[in-house]
Amino acid sequence: MVSTDFMRQLEGYGLTTATILYRMPDHLSVLQTYIWQQYDLAPRFPVLKDFLKFWKRELEGPLHSVTIAHSRLIKPAEIRTVNGVLTLH
């Protein structure tokens, strides 16, 4: 059985890491860091955008900045069919 993460990669999803700086609710001059990582689609990042909407709606720490790194782990040239079976190269 093929994993869900692998199938997402075949659909074009790549590993996205976001470094989120946010302010402490009681001490707005203090910044904290939160690292978020998930499979997402560049350049629109719908999964990350949904998470940030949740953050703004549900959490008290106001966002300061978000830095994004993204990498497609499987590229189209690395996948091909051999005798009807998907193989990675």
Image: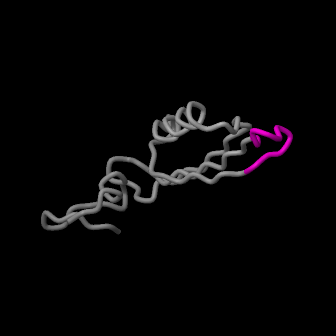
Query: In the rendering, at what x and y percent does residue 86 appear?
Result: 22, 63
| The residue positioned farthest toward the right in the image shown | 29
Q: Is 83 in front, or is 46?
A: 46
Height in image: 41 above or below 5? above
Scheme of colours in the image: one colour
- Residue 53: say if magenta: no
- What's drawn in magenta, residue-wise? 23-32
Residue name at image x 62 percent, y 54 percent: 35
Question: Which residue is most to the front?
Answer: 26
**Where, by quadrant of the figure, is residue 83 drawn?**
bottom left
- The image position of residue 4, as x and y in percent, is 30, 56
Location of the C terminus (image quadrant): bottom left
Query: Left or right: where does residue 70 sit relative to residue 76?
Result: right
Q: Which of 45 and 83 is in front in this view?
A: 45
Residue 20 is left or right of residue 16, and the answer is right
Quarter containing the N terminus: bottom left
Residue at 21 percent across and 62 percent down: it is: 81
The structure residue drawn at horizontal position 86% and vertical position 40%, both measured from the top left corner, is 29
30 inside magenta stretch: yes
- x 83%, y 41%: residue: 27
58 relative position to 75: left or right: right
Numbered label tally: 0
Compared to residue 88, the image places residue 19 above or below, namely above
Task: Give the x, y percent position of residue 62.
Answer: 70, 35
**Majority SS type along the magenta span:** strand
